[in-house]
Amino acid sequence: MSSAIGVVDQIEAEFYGALGERVRQIRRKRNLSQETLAQHLGLARSSVANLESGRQHPPIYVLTLLAQALDVSEADLLPSRRERPFLDTDRLEQRLQELDEHQQHMIRSTARAAGFSLSDA
């Protein structure tokens, strides 16, 4: 089971890293400091720094607040296709082959529930 958790943890880490970089890019484009953005959000500057580095995983409501503070849609905060290597299905399929059948089924079922399709190889 730990191999499946490792795959999910890696995908999650890559997602939040890409999300944080996207927030940083938009913040800089808007000429906002981390301190100013933090004040708009009611957070500490260190929280914004941790979010931008991928160390902090914001809940959905914080994404909504971020979008409002940066004057973008929530979708604009999400990494672009180019910024999402963690959603490379070929790479995911290779990683899935490292797992046992039960773990593969668990990951594929979770992906389907999230609206993401992986083959049932």
Image (cartoon, rainbow, N blue to C red):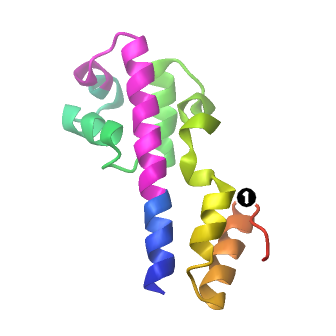
* Relative image position of residue 104 (x, y in whole percent): 65, 80
Other-residue count near label 1 (Cα within 10 Å), few / some / many at <14 / 14–19 / ≥20: few
| 114 to 55, vertically: above or below | below
Secondary structure type for disc 1: loop
Q: Amino acid at mark 1?
A: Phe
* Relative image position of residue 119 (x, y in whole percent): 79, 69
Q: Is residue 5 magenta?
A: no
Q: Is residue 114 left or right of residue 58?
A: right
Give whichever of 57, 111 is nearer the camera: 111
- Residue located at (33% from left, 41% from top): 51
| 6 to 75, vertically: above or below | below
Q: Is residue 42 left or right of residue 67?
A: left
Q: Give the residue pinned by disc 1.
A: 116
The answer to whether residue 59 shows anywhere in this view is no
The majority secondary structure of the magenta stretch comes to: helix
- Residue located at (61% from left, 63% from top): 92
Q: Which residues are magenta?
A: 12-37
| 8 to 71, vertically: above or below | below
- Using the rendered view, name the quadrant where residue 80 is placed: top right
The answer to whether residue 54 shows anywhere in this view is yes
Q: Is residue 12 left or right of residue 31?
A: right
Give whichever of 72, 41 is nearer the camera: 72
The mark tally for this picture is: 1
- Residue located at (44% from left, 66% from top): 9
* Relative image position of residue 20 (x, y in whole percent): 40, 38
Q: Is residue 2 left or right of residue 109?
A: left
| 118 to 81, vertically: above or below | below
- Using the rendered view, name the quadrant where residue 13 is placed: bottom left
**Residue furthest to the top:** 31
